[in-house]
Image (cartoon, grey):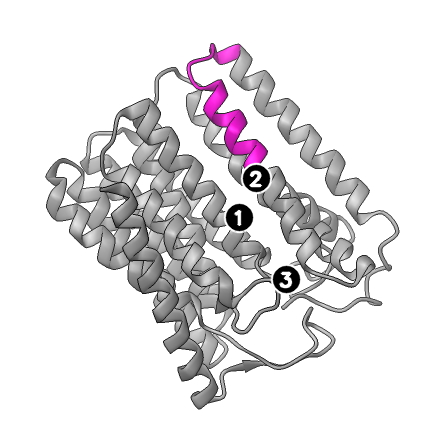
Amino acid sequence: MILAWGAAQLALAAFGTWLARRYALRRRLLDQPGERRSHSVATPRGGGIAIVACLLAGALLLAWWFPAERALLLAGSAALLLVAAVGWIDDHRALSAWLRLAVHAVAGLLLAGAALRSGHGLPVAAAGFAATVVLVNVWNFMDGIDGLAASQCAIAALGYGLLALLGLGGGAAVLLAFSLAAACAGFLPFNFPRAAIFLGDVGSGALGLALAWICLLIAPRLDGPMSWTLLLLPLSAFLVDAALTLGTRMLRGEAWWRPHVQHAYQCWARRIGRHPPVTLAYAAWGGAAVLTMLAARGLDAAYIIALATAWGLGAGGAWVILRAGSPPPGKERSQE
């Protein structure tokens, strides 16, 4: 069933992306090259709407099949629709960053409220809210070169699906995670190795929301008080790059909320003049993180904390190395 489910989502996402590209070209929804872009030719945007449509359809079916998890599935669907809608509008005409953030917060509250209603307690609800707001924005920050955001999401979602399948024995989280991974896989041929269409804000924010949603379905059912920490490993490349880059910009007194090209992946791609090697290297890191997460399930809390700390330090060291030799701020091109 899982293979058929994934194959259907992949095919629908591929077809939906093809339709989205035709729509973007007809409406002239194009990201133009320029000082604040990483691409060199005008490229359609908004392809992430196909992933959103597949995930919404899948989630509504799962809400029917798994009544015990219906509250989180329906709340997550509403939250996904909110984030995707504000992103879709922003792809057509620019919206205030603070308005978008307010919508992201409402989406987080929807998931947090559903977690409370499902009996998971205040700490889980608060974590769900924080994860939603953080991951929506991190995926938007990190969507800057061909294939990166969609491939990292696909790898993390596949890992979460396997974790839920092996550790929890099934449930809605398994099929929702595989839905996300398959939909991203259907989109990727249009976005990598050379993008024919970008995710757009409709897609990048939705991917972050979907990952937070899946984590909220999985985390309360994991064994051990610190097992949830393992869920951070597949996200580590993006979380560390975004956090350290943002922190550096704040310390420099820069307008940190504005587009830029100071992320490690951007510095590396600019230095070598190509996107695919960077995307593939991040994918290798993500794959290793997934394998580590799966191997570490069931370990004692102290080992899990030590492992997650070491992994984070490794990611931080990689961030320093990849940014070495990058041009000073103000002399670089900004992200897609």
Numbered mark located on residue 152 in the image: 1
Where residue 223 appears, as percent x and y from the top left, is 35, 17
| SS for dot 2 | helix
| Magenta segment, prevailing SS (helix, strand or loop) | helix
Relative vertical location of residue 290 with respect to residue 4 in this rendering, above or below: above
- Asked if disc 1 and disc 2 are in contact, CB closer than 8 Å, the reply is yes
Relative vertical location of residue 50 with respect to residue 28 in this rendering, above or below: above
Q: CA distance from mark 1 to mark 3?
A: 12 Å
Image point 29% across, 25% down: which residue? 168
Image point 41% across, 45% down: which residue? 211
**In the figure, residue 122 lies in which quadrant?**
top left
Q: Is residue 277 left or right of residue 44?
A: right
Where residue 105 appears, as percent x and y from the top left, is 39, 53
Query: Crowding at label 2, few (<14), some or many (≥20) Cα neighbours within 10 Å?
Result: many
Q: Is residue 284 left or right of residue 318?
A: left
Among numbered discs 1 and 3, the one appearing first in the sequence: 3
Where residue 310 appears, as percent x and y from the top left, is 65, 23
Residues drawn in magenta? 287-302
Image point 48% across, 49% down: which residue? 153
Among numbered discs 2 and 3, the one appearing first in the sequence: 3
The residue carrying mark 2 is 286
Q: Amino acid at mark 3?
A: Ile
* Residue 123 visible to the viewer: no
Quadrant that contains the N terminus: top left
Q: CA distance from mark 2 to mark 3?
A: 16 Å
Among numbered discs 1 and 2, the one appearing first in the sequence: 1
